[in-house]
Image: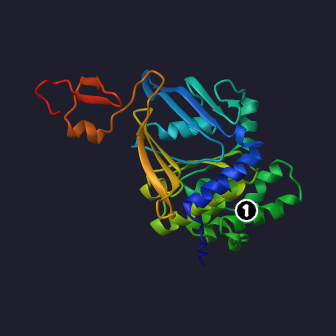
């Protein structure tokens, strides 16, 4: 049996998440900079060969935000997620989450960070749940390890109901569909009331309808608990349902898409979508690949400062303008 929930529109969910996040933070003045990456570098060395996965990535995520990170395979998006979740250590730069400095954390502090401050949902459903425990027992387990006592059982049921799988409480993972397992995994990830939830392609193995149910669970958790949610995804449908989408290319943030609620001339509220290139502290930005191809831009370009914009032209005098 599949339970379909009525989900409020994106603008309503955004407002609710901001309100819960402000209450959680102790005031609206503490909302900004929940996640901060500045000049983040990650270099992997294998058999003497160095691979630069991140080349000075910059990113700021506000408390209570629901953010999607997109990018081609090998762009560095999963590396960012692994670093921010405490599963990997950056090579250089700044990476802070909820006040934790991820470059200097001791092993003990890193374990505490992963146990209490962040939650994680893997793409593979089998990695999120223990197969010999029921859904409720899987959600209770993190709370038992944190010694939360009898309140854990009640809290587990509340979370399962919140993500729409309360009816699966006594089922083991093998008795649930892939979508039900992923929604249960979301409940497990927030069992210890983390400040941030990271999800790595949580809908990657699901069909479109089931993926929508899983993402609705993430939006509900974000709105009802005020948890900051960062999702890495290839799914364009998922990316279109968040306030901000950050695109990573070649180990750097390349562009952002912002969706904001505005009231039109007719008094009806609507979502307005705007895309921006990302300018780093050194003044560098990546031009969209489609622009580069359309104008055959290669090697060098000419910049002209106009009163209200910068004009970019081909550096080849005989090239396309």
User: Looking at this view, is 261 or 77 the one in front?
Assistant: 261
- Going by the image, does 197 lie left or right of 154? left
Look at 24% across and 23% down and name the residue there. Answer: 302
Task: Specify whether residue 240 is in view.
Answer: no
Res. 34 image quadrant: top right
* Depicted 122 relative to depicted 59: above or below: below
- Going by the image, does 44 lie left or right of 177? left
Task: From the top left corner, tell me how far across and down residue 19 is, in percent.
Answer: 70, 52
User: Looking at this view, is 142 or 260 the one in front?
Assistant: 260
Near mark 1 (Cα within 10 A), the count class, few <14, some 14-19 or many ≥20, is: many
Task: From the top left corner, tell me how far across and down residue 173 is, in percent.
Answer: 64, 65
Task: From the top left corner, tell me how far across and down residue 109 is, in percent.
Answer: 75, 31
Look at 65% across and 29% down and name the residue there. Answer: 102
Most extreme residue toward the front is 265
Determine whether the residue tagged by mark 1 lies in a helix, strand or loop: helix
User: Looking at this view, is 9 or 235 the one in front?
Assistant: 9
Task: From the top left corner, tell me how far across and down residue 315 is, in percent.
Answer: 20, 24
Look at 86% across and 49% down and name the residue there. Answer: 147
The residue singled out by tag 1 in the image is 159
- Going by the image, does 134 lie left or right of 209? right
- Going by the image, does 110 lie left or right of 151? left
Most extreme residue toward the left is 318
Look at 48% across and 23% down and name the residue there. Answer: 281
Task: Specify whether residue 110 is in view.
Answer: yes
- Quick one: quadrant of the C terminus? top left
* Depicted 106 relative to depicted 247: above or below: above
* Depicted 67 relative to depicted 155: above or below: above
- Quick one: quadrant of the N terminus? bottom right
* Depicted 155 relative to depicted 26: above or below: below
């Amino acid at each position: 049996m599949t339970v379909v929930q009525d989900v409020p529109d994106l603008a309503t969910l955004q407002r609710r998440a901001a309100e819960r996040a402000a209450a959680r933070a102790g005031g609206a003045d503490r909302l900004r900079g929940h996640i901060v990456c500045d000049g983040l570098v990650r270099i992997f060395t294998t058999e003497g060969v160095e691979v630069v996965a991140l080349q000075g990535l910059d990113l700021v995520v506000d408390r209570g935000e629901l953010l999607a990170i997109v990018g081609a395979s090998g762009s560095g998006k999963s590396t960012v997620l692994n670093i921010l979740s405490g599963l990997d250590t950056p090579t250089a730069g700044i990476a802070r989450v909820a006040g934790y400095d991820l470059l200097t954390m001791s092993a003990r502090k890193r374990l505490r960070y992963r146990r209490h401050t962040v939650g994680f949902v893997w793409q593979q459903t089998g990695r999120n749940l223990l197969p010999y425990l029921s859904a409720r027992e899987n959600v209770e387990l993190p709370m038992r390890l944190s010694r939360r006592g009898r309140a854990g059982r009640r809290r587990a049921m509340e979370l399962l109901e919140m993500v729409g799988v309360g009816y699966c409480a006594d089922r083991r993972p093998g008795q649930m569909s892939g979508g039900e397992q992923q929604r249960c995994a979301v409940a497990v990830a927030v069992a210890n009331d983390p400040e941030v939830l990271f999800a790595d392609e949580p809908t990657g193995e699901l069909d479109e309808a089931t993926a929508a149910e899983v993402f609705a669970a993430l939006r509900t958790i974000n709105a009802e608990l005020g948890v900051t949610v960062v999702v890495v995804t290839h799914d364009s449908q998922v990316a279109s349902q968040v306030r901000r989408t950050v695109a990573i290319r070649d180990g750097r943030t390349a562009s952002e898409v912002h969706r904001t609620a505005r009231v039109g001339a007719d008094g009806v509220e609507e979502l307005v979508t705007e895309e921006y290139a990302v300018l780093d502290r050194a003044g560098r930005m990546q031009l969209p690949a489609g622009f580069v191809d359309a104008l055959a831009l290669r090697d060098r370009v000419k910049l002209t400062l106009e009163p209200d914009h910068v004009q970019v032209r081909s550096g080849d005098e005989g090239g396309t303008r």
